[in-house]
Amino acid sequence: MSPGPLRDPSRGPAPVVPPLPARGAAGAVNAVDAAKTVDAVDAVGPGDDLDAARRADALAGRTVLVPRAPERAAGLAATLRGAGAHVLVSPAIERAPVEDTAPVDGALARLLHGDFAWVVVTSVNAIDELLASAARQGVDLGDAARRARWAAVGPATRRALEAVGVTVELEPDENSARGLVAAFAALPPSDQTSTSADQASTSGDHGSTSGNQASTSRGRGVVLLPQGDLAAPTMHDGLHDLGYVPHVVTVYRTVTHTLAPDVVAAWRAGAVDAVVLTSGSVAREVARQLGPRDDVVGVAIGDPTARAARDVGLRLDAVAERPTDAALAAALVGALAATRTTAGSAALPDDPAAPPAAGTTGVDPTPEGDPS
């Protein structure tokens, strides 16, 4: 089946991706490294080309906290530093392996046997764990991938999959689990047919389903969902409601990472001007470790992260239009420029055109893509 009809035509041709890191054993390419390359490609694109003078004016001399792993923060940090910002990079969370790898290894073996109709990936982190499982079993993930159809939540996840030889057939316009469920719901009947997975038994973190139940669920087949331990049930429940049989496998854990002492000191001293939040887990850890501050501009990678930030009392000024470094930089520039404008207008109280203070107006929600 051709993947073409399942991709949004408005996306246009995919950009040319620079050479990727060399493959290791069993053809493995670290998915985080692939995603970094993707972010570099996404740095310039429709709607992302920032005016250099405006960017420098907003960022020069500002201190921005990016509570993300250095390898994931590198692209955004370089952009911000290039515009004169002081960037503090310190992860608030980190990925940890699961203690028992038997479930993911078993799922990959089932994938090789053609037991799944679809594999749905909602995080770049899950790709690394699938690659690790393939390496343990001496197989190539790209070869195993051809036994099923693949869906990705957003551009970074899709391109990281493509970098390791996986063809992605479905990517939603709204880069979130909710958007991906909607994309499955919109598939034409010809793309909702079952495979040999209908005859399989499936079990996972959300319980087990027999092969007979799978074959009577409107014949849409079993879907592998490799996820982190903190993943919400949105994808599982949405696919189940559509008649698919979700098979959830926890492939990694999200654990707390203590922020660097200089970051804590800068935050408490009021020396941080803005923070970039790239997942709900990051937002919760920033609030837990540092505490909310009304004077720190907050920018979120997507609406789920924005909701999490608000829930824990963090200030939220802007949401990136897309889950890319370029879009995050654009949102940050806009938010910080608004604070400069507001500060400059404070001396002119009679100016009827003066904008409201940053953070006092509602932020239109936008979809969130690949979580940290």
Image (tube, rainbow, N blue to C red):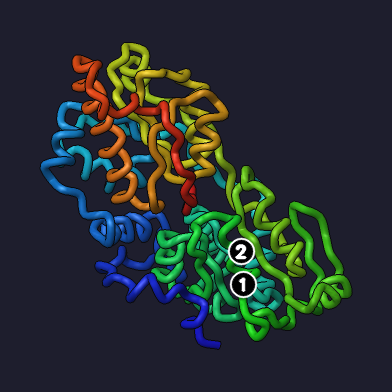
Relative to residue 29, is residue 290 depicted above or below?
Answer: above
The vertical placement of 316 against 36, above or below, is above
* Residue name at image x 69 percent, y 72 percent: 110
Query: Could you tell whether 314 is left or right of 348 in the image?
Result: right
Write down the residue under mark 1. 186
The residue sitting at 42% across, 37% down in the picture is 277
Q: Residue 63: in sight, yes or no?
A: no
Q: Are marks 1 and 2 in contact (CB under 8 Å)?
A: yes
Percent position of residue 367, x then y: 49, 51
Residue 79, position as x, y percentages in the image = 21, 44
Residue type at mark 1? Answer: Ala
Q: Give the left or right position of residue 329, taking residue 146 as reference.
A: left
Identify which amino acid the numbered label 2 is placed on: Ala
The reply, left or right, for residue 353 in relation to residue 223 is: left
- The answer for how far apart the CA atoms under marks 1 and 2 are is 6 Å
The residue closer to the viewer here, 120 or 333, is 333
- Circle 2 is placed at which residue position? 182
Residue at 22% x, 23% y is 351
